[in-house]
Amino acid sequence: MTDDSSLDDMTSAVITVNEGGRGFIVRGRNNRLVITAAHCLPFVPPAVSFSFAEERTYAALLAPLGQQPAIMAECLFVDPVADIALLGPPDDDAAPDELDAYEELVDAGEVPGDLPTPISKGLRDAFWGAMGAYSH
């Protein structure tokens, strides 16, 4: 059972993704990331290992909960069958102002620590396994 303060902390990590979708801010290895449903993405990036960042980057995708999306994010992982996606910051060389807006958004919420459940561990393991040693 969680107390009201931990529930408030978790709720502050929920953000708007695209039009009407939701995402959850989580701690990544080097930065904060967003987990969302794959169907919230405007399009699925190309399924090739040599795609360009701009093919995986969405303009005006994220926002604080209840606001109109205006913040850019890059898709780091997507599984359309499982309907899950992992979003990260846009490329800092190509869009430094957008990176600042992303970091301001994901740093604003209180991100809960590791949740001691098999489900959260399974999700984390699946993402990090798929991502390899990703670092931005």
Image: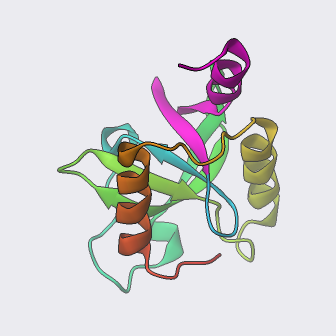
Q: Nearer the viewer, residue 44 or 111?
A: 111
Instruction: From this view, report whether residue 37 is shown above or below residue 89.
Output: above
Residue 93 coordinates in the image, percent (x, y)? 74, 77
Quarter of the image for residue 122 reads bottom left
The question of residue 130 being in magenta is answered with no
Query: What residue appears at the point 38 percent right and 38 percent down from the top-left corner?
Result: 40
Query: What residue appears at the point 69 percent right and 41 percent down from the top-left corner?
Result: 111
Residue 110 coordinates in the image, percent (x, y)? 75, 36
Instruction: From this view, report whether residue 111 is shown above or below residue 88.
Output: above
* Tally of numbered discs: 0
Q: Nearer the viewer, residue 118 or 62?
A: 118
Quarter of the image for residue 51 reads bottom left
In the image, the segment drawn in magenta is 1-26
Residue 89 coordinates in the image, percent (x, y)? 65, 60
Query: What residue appears at the point 33 percent right and 45 percent down from the top-left corner?
Result: 38
The residue lying furthest to the top in this view is 4
Q: Visible in this render: residue 18? A: no
Instruction: From this view, report whether residue 59 is shown above or below residue 48.
Output: above
